[in-house]
Amino acid sequence: MINKIADEKLPQDLQDAINTFIKQTSIVDEYKLDTMPIEYFVNLINKLYDYKDYKTVMDLLEILESVVDVKRKKL
């Protein structure tokens, strides 16, 4: 089980997206699944783009864009 949650200083909808992704990651780990439905990842990335003005979020998106072609506004 992953015992992490999004920072409470973030907007609530961004916290929800992060926490949902963390919860699903825990489920994948707990049940030793090979994959997670891609929708959880896509929802998280789309929500991060909504808050790209946050320095930390922009840093994460820049890292992601450096390895994956996700430069569209929405996936």
Image: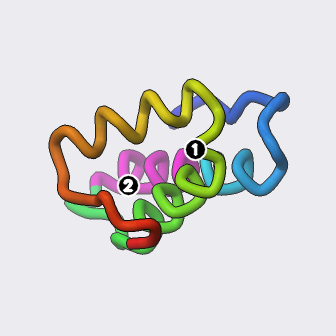
Q: Which residue is mark 2?
A: 28
> What type of secondary structure mainly makes up the magenta span?
helix
Snapshot quadrant of residue 53: top right
Q: Which mark is residue 71?
A: none
Q: Is residue 28 magenta?
A: yes
Q: Is residue 6 left or right of residue 68?
A: right
Name the residue at 40% across, 41% down.
61
Towards the viewer: 69 or 30: 69
Q: Is residue 71 magenta?
A: no
Residue 66 drawn at (x, y percent) = 20, 38
Name the residue at 19% across, 57% down.
69
Tell me which amino acid carries mark 2: Val
User: Are the residues at dot 2 and dot 1 in contact (C-beta closer than 8 Å)?
Assistant: no
Q: Is residue 17 left or right of residue 10?
A: left
| Element under disc 2 | helix
Which region shows up in magenta? Answer: 20-32
Residue 41 drawn at (x, y percent) = 41, 60
Name the residue at 30% across, 33% down.
63
Q: Which residue is mark 1?
A: 52
